[in-house]
Image (cartoon, rainbow, N blue to C red):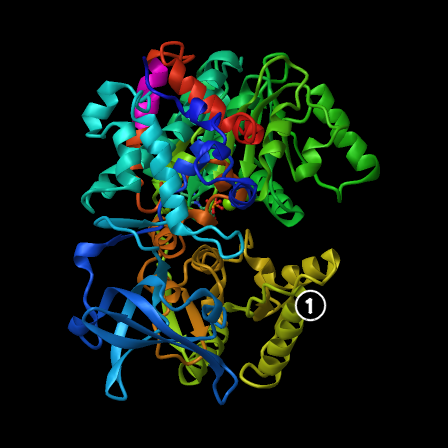
Amino acid sequence: MSGITLRELAGIEVERLKGVGDKKRAALAAVGITNVLDLITTYPRRWVDRTNEARIADLVPGEEALVLATVRTVRGRRTRNRRSMVTVGVGDGSGRMEVVFFNQPWRERQLREGLPVALFGKADTYRGGLQMANPIVDLIGDRTGRIVPIYPQSEKAQLNTWEMAAWVEEALRRCDERGIADPVPASVRERLGLEDRGAAFRHIHVPDEIQQKEFARRRLAFDELLRVQLVLVLRKRAMEREQLGIEHVVDGELLGRFYDVLPHDLTAAQRRTIAEILEDLAGPHPMHRLLQGDVGAGKTVVAVAAMLAAVQGGHQAALMAPTEVLAEQHAAGVRALLADVTVPDPGNLFGDRPLRIELLTNRVTGADRKDVMAGLADGSVDVAIGTHALIQEAVDFHSLGVVVVDEQHRFGVEQRAALRDKTTAAVVPDTLVMTATPIPRTAAMTVYGDLDVSVLDELPPGRTPIVTKWANGPLLEAEVWADVREQVAAGRQAYVVCPLIEESEKLEVASAQQTFDRLLNGELAGLRMGLLHGRLGAADKEATMELFRAGRLDVLVATTVIEVGVDVPNATVMVILDADRFGIAQLHQLRGRVGRGEHASRCWLVTQQTDESSPRVEALVATADGFELAEVDLDLRGEGTLMSSAQKGRSDLKLASLRRDRKLVELAREAAFEIVDADAHLDDHPDLADELDLIFSDRDEEFLSRS
Ligand code: ADP
Ligand code: MG
């Protein structure tokens, strides 16, 4: 008989386990556990190794240790400054100590006389005895065994870790006879040194040796990652197989003309990326490619090359930006870049015709709008640049060949798909997604795993690197304002970014106004200053931006509204106030507003005086490389912030961490390609297919259908 599959385990309700009656069933359901699969994939949060425990008598003051002890006394009171304080006396065979909990009044109810507890913390001497303050407490029940798994406990749901352990053990014991099936091909398991799945489940829950849980974790984390990668790779291969695209002309004259008018040589990275894209475009299947490139890496040129490839074959191209300001900026930039490029027109006796580039946002109205729409429909518009207005119902393209989506993270997946569907032809246009938010490689494999990835990892030559400094406290801040005045005196311009106030735009605007007033009447008196924030109307914003662009303002005080896309090469100083409130990616984006011209630029990160380290600020000072910063960010914040919570919840990653398991992500992706390329529909891997179906189908329509 073959082993028990995950689907079978999912079919066994928890009531079938000993001691699970109505009450416990409800308690388990409250934490999302309704069947045996849920139960055994609820992993211990820690493991207590009894052979490593210290006796109270052996505790060394100042060192962290784990002790197993029994509660003797519990006493709660309020301190003079009204904090709650619970004092618990504990003892083991060797001695006694006092444990105090501040601001955890519920400990008085949780800890009762006679209860065995595992305490992890630092003991100190206090009034001649030993005391541990706010240790980690695990209620372990009076269980024997060398290694005790500690499950996530829920006070409210009334589940104890020892009950969980008992149910898990019972469930695993019942699987013993048939064993748990292992659908991962033996060749993959052997190559990667992965233990059998059944053994892994046993070893993660009830390890005989503490190291066993590590092997088990690696195996089970691999399974999670493999499932995600299989879904993405299956999807990617299916798109490649099934979607019919346009075989674009990539060696036509138009592209050549474009290269000829470029004021600069392409960087090697631009050349490589364009080659990757053109190869996709020439192929019969639509491109789905992500272009990652740091701020200022020169993505626009790459995008334009892709769009011209479509145009030279008689198709249209669209570029979609997340905001009207950005769309307008793109339109101006692309028009300037292509001003002297005409389209070879064999049907025309006089040879060439001009390129038609049109802007479509909600600000384009009336007759202009009608005109653009008609041009999109009859094919006379070659390149359309716009916002989400491009994907509205009424917009029809004659033959959309290439779609470029800028700053993808601001768009929903559905929007991308909608733009691709905007064509009357039966073919799917090629899609290029551009992002300036660097994502660590392995994270990109998971978040964008169904896309091919090109990386622009080289800045155009001639940039003067931005010097970044941390102004820690008022003394250094004075230096910042002196620097601003000096730069302005030399004819340059500066940005001042006001503190981020996440909770309230109103407060943020008020604080920006305050900063503006303070600087205007104080440190920066006499300079020409403008203020930009989210509560200004579009026209006011644009007017202020225009003044700054034209050099008629020296200093632009702004909230983060200037984060993306603003391009003023004469601005050489970026001052970010309360910089420690911003995330790494945001600081990096803001910093990218300077260093765009010939003059040396600097970025000041201002914080309140502090003796503590500020890892994000320090990271920005240490490097200007967006990818390096993305890695630091991932280390500091974890992957939760990378994938939207929806993606994370849906992606079944309980053990695997994109941060910890970088190598494993790559191995899982490789294995997924190996499996799918040999067996496109998983016909020879029915158990694996069934597992994907089980884990992703009902709750994950959206995850599966993302593109
Ligand atoms: P991104 O969109 O990647 O942030 P852009 O496409 O806006 O960057 O380019 C940033 C600046 O670099 C622009 O002023 C552009 O003209 C310039 N640039 C792009 N490619 C090159 C190159 N190969 N050599 C010199 N300058 C370049
Ligand atoms: Mg850009």
Q: Is residue 194 magenta?
A: no
Vertical comparison of 190 with 607: above or below:
above
Vertical comparison of 605 with 654: above or below:
below
Q: How busy is the neighbourhood of tag 1: few (under 14 within 10 Å), some, or many (20 plus)? A: few
Which residues are drawn in magenta? 669-677
Left of 308 or right of it: where is 552? right
Q: Measured from the top left, where is residue 585 in percent x and y?
A: 45, 54
Left of 405 or right of it: where is 142? left
Left of 584 or right of it: where is 180? left
Which residue is located at x 35 percent, y 28 percent? Answer: 174
Residue type beneath disc 1: Lys
- Which residue matches tag 1? 506
Q: Is residue 676 magenta?
A: yes
Q: What is the residue that sits farthest to the top in this orientation?
A: 683
Q: Measured from the top left, where is residue 615 in percent x and y?
A: 35, 65
Q: Depth check: give the residue in front, 116 or 686.
A: 116
Q: Depth check: give the residue in front, 389 or 309.
A: 389
Residue 668 visible to an observer of this rendering:
yes
Say which quadrant the N terminus sits in: top left
Residue 296 visible to an observer of this rendering:
no
Kind of element beneath mark 1? helix
Q: Measured from the top left, where is residue 142 in percent x and y?
A: 31, 55
Secondary structure mostly seen in magenta is helix
Q: Depth check: give the residue in front, 647 or 697.
A: 697
Q: Measured from the top left, where is residue 394 in percent x and y?
A: 77, 28
